[in-house]
Image: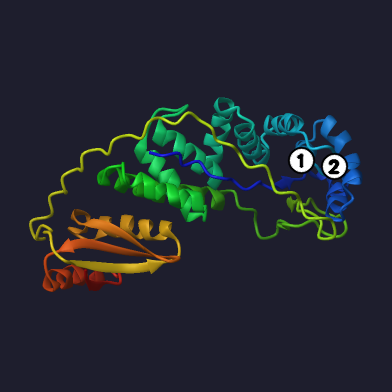
Amino acid sequence: MKQIWGTLAALTGALMIAAPVLADVKAGVDAWQQGDYARAIAQWRPLAQAGDADAQFNMGQAYKLGRGVQSDMSTAIEWYRKAAAQGHTRAEDNLGLLMFQQGDRAGAMPYLQKAATRGEARAQYIVGTALFNGDLVSKDWVRAYALMTRASSAGLSQATTSLAQMDKYIPSADRQKGLALASEMESQQQAGQLAFAPSVSTPRAVEPSPRPTSGPLRTSDLPSSATARPAPAPIAPKPALAQAAAPKPAPKPAAPRPAASVPAPSAGGWRVQLGAFSEDGRARSLWSSLSGKVSGLSAYQPYYVKGGPVTRLQAGPLASNADAQRLCGRLKAAGADCIPKKM
């Protein structure tokens, strides 16, 4: 497989603010949003030095972006590491991504693996690539395909490109397992988010209020100021992991034996179309869901047909229009859309 590492966007990140230091950290956030980066740093530095994880995370952001201080990736990593050691998950995510950018890929991998589990798309892309190539971690094509599918579904275009390349090498059976695992990961992540979701009465502001509130501010973004000059383009990771030679395509697995009541698929010039999607990952997720529900569908080959920004999910081949109509009948009975297509 050719190199599939891609450019990753920088993370602006959210900070968790503890009530005892709310006013000081909040004052720094206000100054940052007003473009007064020096005052923001003056607010955060003593708190960070005293051990406040949110202030440490903000210092890492400032040094990474070069706002109020000279850009210094090593210092940014130091502050992220201190916040991460106290359980600051966004600092942990940034730490892994920045370490990877700076060339410490082995040291970054444990942080990236945890970030991928939490649903961080860029981490899923990096770990998925490592699992495919067997770089830094043991090769696992099923998990690699699952993580790359999740990253693609999140809108990371590089992951969508990588999935298309993976399709050339990963056997169909392993791709199906990967799609099922991706669906399981999504369910687990959603369950975790619900389990830890704040109650309705808990403040959930995603931007700092103009004045400190009487209760604890749970979350706050650290965006660039609307009045300040635009932030410089973030430094993208430069994944230079030694790439293993492109693996030879594995022998195509035999098609699963269909149920006795379902005729085996045969070669032909017909397919059935199950839908058209703006995101490739949604087409793959639908195939994973339907192939587990519709008897005999998994015996057919999925086709992801690109047409501009649209991906059409098709299955086949089928020998005749009558065969396509019969398969559509089973799909529609399961609640899916289906259109016979002559190829």
Whether residues under marks 2 and 1 lie with C-beta atoms below 8 angstroms apart, the answer is yes
Q: Nearer the viewer, residue 102 or 83?
A: 102
- Name the residue located 81 percent from the left edge and 60 percent from the top edge: 226
The colour scheme used here is rainbow
Task: Tell me where residue 256 appears, x and y as whole percent.
Answer: 16, 48
Could you tell which of marks 2 and 1 lies nearer the N-terminus? 2
| Quadrant occupied by the C terminus | bottom left
What is the secondary structure assignment of the residue under circle 2?
helix
Q: Which of marks 2 and 1 is in front?
A: 1
- Name the residue located 62 percent from the left edge and 39 percent from the top edge: 93
- Name the residue located 78 percent from the left edge and 53 percent from the top edge: 224
Where does label 2 land, which residue? 21
Q: Spatial distance from mark 2 to mark 1, Cα to Cα? A: 10 Å
What is the secondary structure assignment of the residue under circle 1?
helix
Q: Which of 50 and 38 is in front in this view?
A: 38
Where does label 1 land, which residue? 54
- Residue 303 lies, with reference to residue 250, above or below; the image says below
Q: Residues within 10 Å of mark 1 (few under 14, many from 20)?
A: many
Task: Tell me where residue 327 appears, x and y as whole percent.
Answer: 18, 67
In this rendering, would 120 be left or right of 98?
A: left
- Name the residue located 86 percent from the left edge and 36 percent from the top edge: 45
Q: What residue type is labelled 1?
A: Asp
Q: Can residue 305 be seen in this view?
A: yes
In this rendering, would 27 be left or right of 79?
A: right
Q: Which amino acid does label 2 sit on?
A: Val
